[in-house]
Amino acid sequence: MDKQAGIDIGGISFKWDLEKGEFLFEQQDAVLFWVSSAMKSFFDTIEEVSGVEASNLVFEATGFRQGIVVGEYFQNMKNVSVTEAVGLITNTYSSAGWGLAKVENLNIEEKTFTAKFKNSWEYKINKAQEKSVGGKYMPAHYAGIFSGLLNENMWYEVVKDQIQGDEFTEVKYFPSTITVNHNIGQLARKTEMDEILHLEAVVEDKVRDLTELVQELSSPIIPVLDGIVVVPLIGKYDEDRSEALLEKTLTNLPSHKAKYVVLDLTGLNENISQHTASFIEKIGSASTLIGVTTILVGISPQLSIIITQSNVQLSNFDCFQTLQHGIHYALAQMGRRII
């Protein structure tokens, strides 16, 4: 077997040196991969690691930037017009297995043209991946090529897609302010916003859970003896917390077969508002309406001052200094006592 070999096809040079493990394409180091197996695995892995949206942008940005290099190379070639460069590029790419590419309706003055791609390596990979939409590498690559050739930032619009059943992929090109850097920045901001929204949702869920837990623990209904329940009021009560406790108390008193509810005010916040005082009157009156007698215990000097300065009437309820006194009173009213 020959250790070195070379061949020219259509004016394109291919050379191999098996002793060095080298493959040269137009005197440049190159590498060969099986498209629908090895390259498919390569693309699949990138999508698995980065996600489909990010990987599409990676292929688009890479294609564009590699195209810039190619376009600037041919733009710097002396005595080679843009039209001639296009012919050289499409012929070279075809010989390298990039599929068939045709550039039509090239208007150098307006810097517009249409490109048609058929059976490109990207199409073959996308087909093996069972994609429903073609990739962005090839369209962006030619945008990069002509950005370099025409000294104008070019962008594209795909109007036909071979992967969707068209005979070829047709792409229109035009000058644009759209850049890969702009697209990368947009994706970064979108990703950041998605993460922020996700974190906000997680925080809201946790706050909701904690709020429910606090409500459950901070205002429990405690059955202490038959017919007697204690409801300790703890902390500060705003409108939402007051309504929640009122509903909870009235809903659960019948299930405990309560005759007396002892509201223990010992744990109320020192900065007691008139709203809190009104709430005490409201829960006591509502309990009376369902046949449960309310007893108040643990009224602090601060609360007593607020009560006397407000229009809140607690004189309808029996009041005691300590919880023990209140429970003994309720038992006595039922003809019972603790021995």
Image: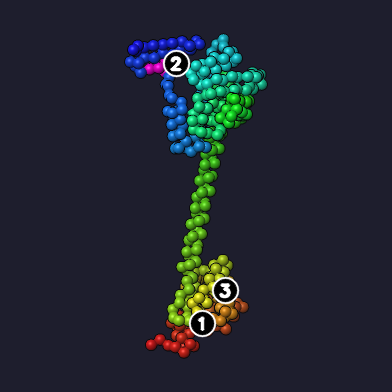
Q: Which residue is mark 1?
A: 259
Q: State the residue at coordinates (38%, 17%).
A: 22
Please tell me which residue lies in front, 27 or 304: 27
- Mark positioned earlier in the residue sequence (1 or 2): 2
Q: Tell me the amino acid under the disc marked 3.
A: Phe
Q: Secondary structure at mark 1?
A: loop
Q: Is residue 62 positioned above or below 314 on the image?
A: above
Q: Tell me the amino acid under the disc marked 2.
A: Phe
Q: Is residue 311 positioned above or below 44 on the image?
A: below
The span from disc 2 to disc 3 (Cα, nearest Å) is 86 Å
Q: What colour scheme does the image use?
A: rainbow
Can residue 7 be found in the magenta stretch?
A: no
Residue 219 place in picture, x, y as percent: 49, 70
Residue 93 place in picture, x, y as percent: 51, 18
Q: Which residue is mark 2?
A: 25
Could you say which disc has been placed on residue 116 in the image? none
- Mark positioned earlier in the residue sequence (1 or 3): 1
Which secondary structure dominates the residues rendered in magenta?
A: strand
Q: State the residue at coordinates (52%, 21%).
A: 99
Could you say which disc has been placed on residue 279 in the image? 3
Residue 282 appears in which quarter of the rendering?
bottom right
The span from disc 1 to disc 3 (Cα, nearest Å) is 20 Å
Q: Tell me the amino acid under the disc marked 1.
A: Lys
Quadrant where the C terminus is found in the figure: bottom left
Query: What segment is highlighted magenta in the picture?
Result: 22-29
